[in-house]
Image (cartoon, rainbow, N blue to C red):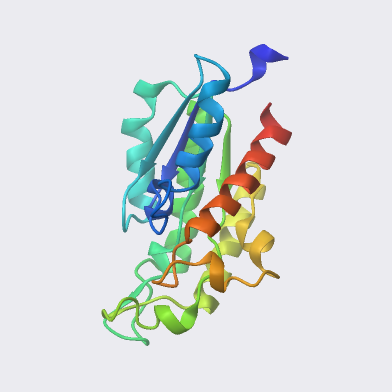
Amino acid sequence: MAERIPRKIVFIGSSSIYGRGDTELGGFVQRFRFHFEPMNPKNLVYSLGVFGENVKALALRISSELPPRSPHLIGIYPGFNDICRIGGAKANTEVALKVFRNEMLNLLQISKMLAPTFVMTGIPFDEQRTTPFLKSDSYFFRSDAKVYSQVVREVASLEAVPILDFDLLWRDREISNLLAEDGLHASPSGHQLLFKQTWNFVSKNYF
């Protein structure tokens, strides 16, 4: 059984992966790393997060950044950059839904060729603070997030990719203390919860 444990785990995605909102320990992936790496000298956790990245760009990074790392397991957090409406509340989403579906399919197919893969849905956010986001001309709506998250589920099911459904796990929680001031990313408490949920998921399915 020990040989099956993934020693090199890559988490890749946008700003939540590199820990946006966690001013204490650098995010849920970093917390995962602090917990996992001391267990075995062969354990490695890579945190590959880029702020503002959409799914198409993420697929390109997976193709170039992951092969040199030879991962045993890949966790993908697509985030919500594809649903951003720039210029006003009635502007189009940055990536149309049909295009997003195709890009998600491509993303998972590429990742699966490299290593066993699981995908994560984005966490619920506070729409009162994301419309607009940080006093900018960018808007994030929960209705868009719901539709695009469902696409993630559908594509994951089609490709037989396990899903860590943060949206579902957080849906009935009081999220005010789990979100950072920007209303979109997790707070330190939120990242701690994400870590626990990620650890439980990976432990159950891969350890």
149 above or below 126? above
Q: Quadrant of residue 87?
A: bottom left
Q: Quadrant of residue 178?
A: bottom right
78 above or below 5? below
Tally of marks: 0
Residue sitting at 31 percent across and 76 percent down? 134
Q: Nearer the viewer, residue 35 or 78?
A: 35
Q: Quadrant of residue 5?
A: top right
Residue sitting at 54 percent across and 58 percent down? 189
Residue 158 can be seen in this image: no
Q: Nearer the viewer, residue 181 or 103?
A: 181
User: Residue 50, position in %: x, y?
Assistant: 32, 49
Q: Nearer the viewer, residue 132 or 156?
A: 132
Residue 202 can be seen in this image: yes
User: Residue 72, position in %: x, y?
Assistant: 53, 23
Residue sitting at 42 percent across and 51 percent down? 24
Quadrant in which the C terminus appears: top right
Q: Is residue 195 left or right of residue 52?
A: right
User: Residue 74, position in %: x, y?
Assistant: 51, 34
User: Residue 52, position in %: x, y?
Assistant: 31, 58
Quadrant in which the N terminus appears: top right
Residue sitting at 47 percent across and 78 percent down? 141
**Residue furthest front in the image:** 24
Q: Nearer the viewer, residue 205 or 57?
A: 205
